[in-house]
């Protein structure tokens, strides 16, 4: 401001003097702002990528990191990236947590927009990242491992299972030897439940070579029926269903409920639900034929408890007395006490990450458990003397106790007892007998719980009503591993196949443990597991990276470059050696790793000799070497010109050390992560001065030194 004021004063004096006479010219020199010449010199530099000799460094990529919204909106960061860099890396937008929805759907809408925008600009995209423990939709992944909960229909089963229940197979027929079909005790879904085992002979060739048929099932010819069963096999298998008694006895069926009708369905180690509907009856009965013969040597299991054929218009044997117990509509239940709040969650936050849940937040534990309550009123009082079964799913953001009860207007009640609540969903089933004729409402009390409680799928039924059953299968470790391996393939295959424009990937990110740098990270060694963390390696073991690289290679383009990436390799040289050893292990198991990325989130006083040694170690691996996330912190509240020069010198040193220690044919490139200084509310290095540009996108001395170092390539 002082320079502006001098000019105003000078202008005013000149005007006055000129109006009186023609004086001699005045000598007046305006002082330039401090650092003006230096800044002008920096501003005269060209774009960063122009300093790289593209002819002699054809494979080298200069990259910049940016958010997906900043790039897709085509604003200033879009222009800055395109002008200065060959390649962009997204901070978050291509990670599992960003694109996987609560139900598991993979949403690449914004990524596809990014690809279109980058392709138009001629800027390549580095895929970051396919397999990582952080920034995951961990809620969805954990839901895949939750107990399998099966609610059988409350409508009577029209299939006579008595020959299965007693093991006599009365009414059931087969075209194979008796010893190939047996009851497998305690092998069904749930505790002490049985399954039917089918051992397909090695000589079987056609599906109908091994056929198992049900007794005749009576039907109403103008009704629609649903068939439900659960099946698995010891090795991958293939099964089909045919019928007797339909107008078309070998129809195509939508076995997977995905809108595509097929001749057969596939089976594997895990219980798989098969559910479909039929209505094309030629008479008042039909039967099912299970055809197992297509794959010889397979052992199949069908759970007996949950084998069901029922009329969709049948009369229910029991009704849930709690309307909208799944909370998919309305506003939830009313309640009161201790400043508590209640309502419905967003869609996708209910049990199993499906639908909604009802929540109650109690600020603190109260002196009486009844001080915080919610209420559901029945249309009519319950029957005195009858026993009622209450079931629901519950979890909290902390541990505590809640208490459900059936209550009268005078506050007398029949309680179900205490229910312990943990931080994971669990199913509760309790019962009580009604001892008064005016029990008209279901009360939940939360006074012994401080925090938020979530309820879902609340059901109250009369125990004498019979009807559908609930089966819970807790998945064993082998099943969990197989589920996660299948999910890894689904994720990588979907993302890589859908993004052919991306020709280089971080396939595995940050695998090595900080405290045990020759070992993999594990949740067991993570003292502060975040909500978005999921350790794939804890389920797939040391070969998780082998699987990931093989999948990326299988589903990607042949020329794609596949990297493993980690941080602190320049800080902890043992970690650098550890990741190199892990790459050697991955390749010993048949996968191919093209390069190693080093995240260099360093500072002005980082150890330069360690940086050089890291580059030498990585170069000795024979792999491509990528500086994947470079920024340099100043360690200052507000850096002085001297500190900014130190920062500039460190940026220069990193480039020079990279060029000196990594042969040209192994240089994939350098990506600047913190392009500009960060605001106080930034998610990365909040309030820091780590960038080549300041917070207002003015070039800093580091820009000049970085450009000069690149020019030496």
Image: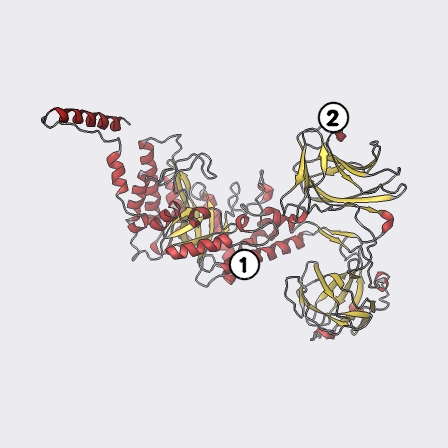
Q: Position of residue 336 (x, y in %)?
A: 72, 32
Which residue sits furthest front? 19
Residue 587 to residue 326: above or below:
below
Q: Position of residue 643 (x, y in %)?
A: 34, 33
Task: Judge by depth and name the residue closer to the eye, 330 or 347.
Answer: 330
Give the residue at mark 1: 494
Tag 2 secondary structure: loop
Residue found 36% across the figure and 57% down from its top: 59
Q: Are marks 1 and 2 in contact (CB under 8 Å)?
A: no
Q: Which label belongs to residue 705?
A: none
Q: For mark 1, does the 10 Å Cα neighbourhood hold few (<14), some (14 to 19), or many (20 or more) residues?
A: some
- Looking at the rendered image, the quarter that the N terminus falls into is top left
Q: CA distance from mark 1 to mark 2?
A: 54 Å
Give the residue at mark 2: 367
Residue found 82% across the figure and 71% down from its top: 173
Please state which of the two labelled residues, at mark 1 or mark 2, is closer to the viewer.
Answer: 2
Task: Judge by depth and name the residue closer to the eye, 533 or 26.
Answer: 26
Task: Judge by depth and name the residue closer to the eye, 393 or 70.
Answer: 70
Which tag, 1 or 2, sits closer to the chain's start?
2
Q: Position of residue 638 (x, y in %)?
A: 37, 30
User: Looking at the rendering, which quadrant does residue 265 occupy?
Assistant: bottom right
């Amino acid at each position: 401001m002082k320079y502006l004021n001098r000019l105003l004063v000078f202008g005013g004096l000149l005007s006055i003097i000129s109006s009186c006479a023609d004086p001699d010219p005045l000598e007046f020199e305006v002082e330039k702002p401090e650092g003006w010449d230096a800044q002008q010199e920096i501003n005269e530099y060209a774009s960063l990528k122009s300093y790289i000799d593209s002819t002699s460094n054809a494979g080298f990529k200069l990259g910049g990191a940016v958010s997906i919204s900043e790039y897709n909106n085509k604003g200033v960061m879009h222009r800055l990236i395109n002008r200065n860099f060959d390649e962009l890396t997204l901070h978050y937008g291509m990670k599992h947590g960003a694109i996987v929805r609560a139900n598991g759907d993979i949403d690449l809408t914004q990524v596809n927009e990014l690809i279109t925008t980058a392709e138009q600009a001629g800027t390549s995209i580095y895929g970051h990242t396919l397999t990582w423990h952080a920034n995951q939709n961990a809620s969805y992944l954990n839901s895949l491992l939750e107990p399998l909960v099966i609610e059988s229909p409350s409508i009577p089963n029209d299939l006579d299972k008595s020959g299965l229940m007693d093991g006599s197979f009365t009414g059931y027929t087969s075209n194979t030897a008796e010893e190939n079909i047996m009851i497998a005790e305690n092998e069904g879904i749930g505790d002490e439940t049985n399954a039917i085992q089918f051992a397909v002979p090695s000589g079987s060739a056609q599906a109908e070579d091994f056929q198992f048929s049900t007794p005749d099932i009576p039907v109403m010819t103008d009704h629609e029926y649903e068939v439900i069963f659960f099946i698995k096999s010891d090795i991958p298998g293939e099964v089909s269903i045919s019928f007797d008694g339909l107008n078309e006895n070998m129809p195509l069926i939508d076995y997977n409920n995905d809108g595509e009708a097929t001749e057969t369905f596939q089976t594997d180690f895990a219980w798989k639900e098969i559910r479909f509907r039929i209505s094309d009856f030629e008479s008042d009965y039909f039967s099912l034929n299970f055809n197992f013969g297509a794959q010889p040597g397979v052992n199949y299991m069908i759970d007996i408890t949950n084998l069901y054929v029922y009329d969709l218009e049948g009369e229910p044997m029991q009704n849930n007395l709690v309307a909208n117990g799944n909370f998919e509509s309305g506003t939830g239940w009313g309640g009161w006490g201790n400043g508590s709040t209640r309502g419905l969650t967003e869609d996708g936050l209910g049990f199993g990450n499906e639908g909604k849940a009802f929540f109650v937040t109690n600020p603190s534990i109260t002196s009486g458990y009844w001080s915080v309550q919610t209420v559901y009123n029945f249309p009519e009082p319950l029957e005195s003397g009858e026993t009622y079964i209450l079931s629901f799913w519950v979890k909290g953001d902390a541990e505590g106790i809640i208490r459900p009860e059936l209550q009268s207007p005078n506050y007398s009640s029949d309680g179900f007892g205490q229910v312990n609540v943990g931080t994971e969903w669990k199913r509760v089933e309790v019962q009580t007998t009604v001892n008064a004729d005016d029990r008209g409402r279901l009360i939940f009390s939360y006074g012994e719980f401080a925090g938020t409680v979530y309820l879902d799928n609340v059901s109250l039924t009369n125990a004498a009503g019979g009807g559908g059953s609930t089966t819970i299968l807790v998945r064993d470790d082998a099943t969990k591993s197989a589920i996660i391996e299948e999910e890894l393939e689904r994720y990588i295959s979907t993302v890589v196949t859908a993004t052919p424009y991306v020709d280089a990937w971080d396939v595995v990110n940050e695998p090595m443990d900080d405290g045990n740098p020759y070992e993999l990270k594990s949740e067991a060694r993570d003292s502060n597991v975040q909500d978005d963390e999921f350790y794939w390696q804890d389920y797939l073991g040391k070969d998780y990276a082998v699987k990931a690289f093989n999948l990326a290679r299988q589903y990607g383009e042949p020329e794609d470059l596949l990297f493993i990436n980690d941080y602190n390799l320049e800080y902890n040289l043992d970690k650098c050696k550890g990741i190199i050893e892990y790459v050697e292990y991955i390749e010993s198991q048949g996968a191919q790793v093209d390069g190693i990325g080093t995240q260099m989130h360093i500072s002005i006083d980082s150890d330069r000799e360690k940086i050089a040694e890291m580059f030498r170690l990585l170069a000795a691996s024979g792999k491509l070497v990528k500086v994947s996330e470079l920024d340099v912190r100043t360690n200052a509240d507000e850096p002085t010109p001297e500190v900014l020069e130190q920062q500039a010198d460190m940026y220069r040193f990193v480039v020079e050390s990279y060029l000196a220690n990594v042969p040209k044919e192994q240089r994939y490139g350098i990506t600047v992560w913190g392009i500009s200084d960060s605001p106080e509310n930034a998610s990365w290095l909040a309030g820091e001065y780590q960038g080549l540009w300041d917070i207002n996108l003015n070039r800093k001395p580091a820009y000049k030194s970085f450009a000069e170092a690149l020019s030496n390539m």
